[in-house]
Amino acid sequence: MSETNDNKQEAPKESAVSTAPSGTPVAPLPRKKRGNRQVTKGQARIQSTYNNTIVTITDLNGATLGWASAGLLGFKGAKKSTPYAASQVVANVVEKVAKHNVKELQVFVKGVGSGRDAAIRALAGNGFDISLIKDTTPIPHNGCRKRKPRRV
């Protein structure tokens, strides 16, 4: 008993234009353009923890223009949280954001790491006009109970 391929149906080929349930063609959604937006004012968000430093530069609406972290640049272990690593992170972000023509920054610092001051100094040293420096470190208002102290 030999079978032939006459009984098998092939699936229709997909086209670039999809169809709605009613059968009418629907054009694909346009992609958002990631071109060179000229932004003169922006925000720098610095997250400095005990283990790493992350710097993000956004426009005033919060859309990211560029970011970098110490781990991304190749710093490992305890070197990620040093002030030198933070200044290198800022230099990398400035290089990425240069095409957007950002001149003035509002700086929001979060965390308690040693890279926070170095990152702010590096931003000022790279030619940005800093109009605001705000500390947004979260502070508990007696929320969760702390761990009991460790006994050695």
Image (spheres, helix red, strand yellow):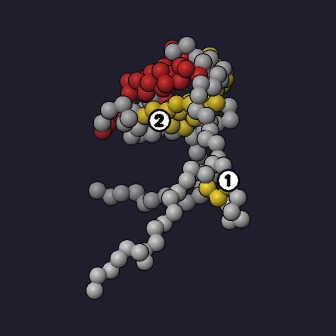
Residue 54 got which mark?
A: 2
Q: Residue at x 52, y 57 (%)?
A: 14
User: How many callouts does the rendering have?
Assistant: 2
- The reply, left or right, for residue 95 in relation to residue 26 is left
Estimate the x, y position of residue 51 in percent, counting from the top left. 39, 40
The kind of secondary structure element at disc 2 is: strand
Q: Residue at x 59, y 46 (%)?
A: 139
Separation of marks 2 and 1 at Cα, in angstroms: 42 Å
> Relative to 75, does residue 38 appear above or below in the rendering?
above
Label 1: which residue?
Answer: 26
> Which quadrant is home to the C terminus?
bottom left
The kind of secondary structure element at disc 1 is: strand
Q: Residue at x 46, y 72 (%)?
A: 9
The crowding category of the residue bearing disc 1, from other C-alpha atoms within 10 Å (few below 14, some 14 to 19, many at least 20), is few
What type is the residue that disc 1 sits on? Answer: Val
The crowding category of the residue bearing disc 2, from other C-alpha atoms within 10 Å (few below 14, some 14 to 19, many at least 20), is many
Estimate the x, y position of residue 95 in percent, counting from the top left. 47, 21
